[in-house]
Image (cartoon, rainbow, N blue to C red):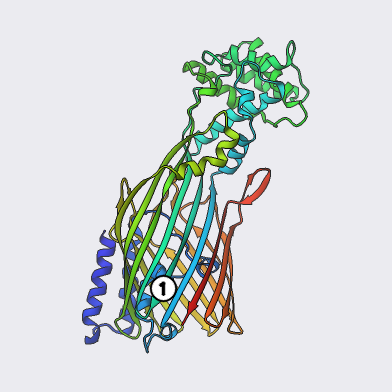
Amino acid sequence: MQSYILIVFITIFVANNWEDGILKYFNKGLIFFASLLIGVSQASAGEWQIVGPRALGMGGANVAVANDATASYWNPGAFGFFDHPGGGDYGNRGWSSSLGAGVGAQVLGGLGEQIDKIDKIDFDSISGDTISTDKVSDLISLIDTLKAFDENKDMAANILVNSGLRIQSGHFGIGAVLFANIAATVPDVDLVNLGTGTTGGITRAEFISDISAGCSPTCSGTTLDQGEKDELSTHLSGLGWSTTEATDLINAVDASLSVPGARPLGVDEIKDATTLIDAAETASGGLIKNNTSEINFKGIAVAEIPITYGRALSEDFAIGGNVKYMKARVYNVPIKLLDDDTDDEFGDSLDTALDDYDEETNFGVDLGMLYRFGDNLRVGLVGRNMNNPKFGDFKEKTQVRAGFAYKPLSFITIAGDADLTKNDTFIKGASKSQNLGAGLEIRLFNFLMLRGGAYKNIAENDIGLVYTAGLGINLWLLNIDVGASMSKKKTDLDDESYPEEVKGAFAISMLF
């Protein structure tokens, strides 16, 4: 709260005293940057989305770059320089429009690998009284996967979407835009209902009997060596299992691992699974077919109609803002993780989640400031949702972001942006979002723009550095832009390797 009150106070103070000359060139910059730093300590909810292919291609840096209708999002202060004789690069922009869309996906904490494991399991084949030998390793793997979910609450998938039409005319603007952020997490893991069979609860005797039934009367295999068997035997003895129980379980698992095409398992995975089986028996657990583990879809989709106005207080300093009508759908939908229809569940789960929501309306306020050190260097500050609009139990807290743009040559722009707020996300646990990004744009032959950059969430280390690239084509009054980003780190899904984060954006704009 204190951060944006001070920002507004400084803006009013500057506006009232500018003509009196009490602020010299250097002091103007000092006060401006002081206001930037105030927002650092304020936490906020919701990730700052990278809107538009130009911004995405330049590493998400656009606070001091946007010079068309998209400035209503990136920095409404730019509207003060539009259609202004002293506005420099902005001054010749009398009218512009932009129609675009972007989508992104993030996979955090190794969720892709764990979902991949579950998606390949035939749930019916491991929840009966008789488990075929080749499916025993699937059962052990499933139990280990539940343990992995329980131990890592930051394991999640995150979907980001933005789209809309923005129009700028002189110092005014209007738009119709959509922002959506939906996260899938596994917050509640059931480690008690792990028993096989169709009736009763979980006992080690029943578990051993069911996984041995497929290779009766005697189970044997050739995958585990004697040292691994001895290690498992010692572990099970420590849990209080008899020699016969330990030997029967080891032989059943070894027989499964020896079937061609069976899911591979390490000794540690087998040890972890048997530890959980033992604990579930102690807790009088039930059957795995009644396991209550859930995948939860949580997030928000907000449709906004922003009305923008900007005013130049001098040839170098401008302020602006948005007043936004906001209509939001808030999602918080749990879906059973293990089901008889598990294979189909993941394909339909997001659609199911999007059909269940609470709808609310409110108003939002954004503020932006832009300062020009001539035409070659600009610095900007923008605060979104300064009034913390609330939708049911969810609050869109203030986001503050700063940026600069520098033109060492007339056809090269170098830019950088930083989130000054550490933003909460929809991922249960310690996951935060605070992005730092930089990029450049090179204009060739006055019609081709090449862009490149990178950004990183400095509040967490899971995804790491994300590389970006983009392309713009200027066809006189019509611009066509594309942008994309891709993380260096990979995750596995459907036996293929994919980046942990990918984003893409496309826009068509008209500039006058």
Q: Quadrant of the N terminus?
A: bottom left
Rendered position, 284 above or below 259: above
**Which quarter of the picture shows residue 441?**
bottom right
Q: Is residue 381 visible?
A: yes
Question: Residue 104's x, y, as percent?
Answer: 53, 56
Pick the front one: 184 or 272: 184
Pick the front one: 110 or 180: 180
Q: Is residue 155 visible?
A: no
Q: Residue at x 52, y 62 (%)?
A: 455
**Which quarter of the picture shows residue 479?**
bottom right
Q: Label 1 amino acid?
A: Ile
Q: Name the residue under label 1.
A: 167
Rendered position, 304 above or below 265: below
Q: Residue at x 51, y 16 (%)?
A: 281
Question: Residue 159's x, y, as percent?
Answer: 50, 51
Pick the front one: 270 or 230: 270
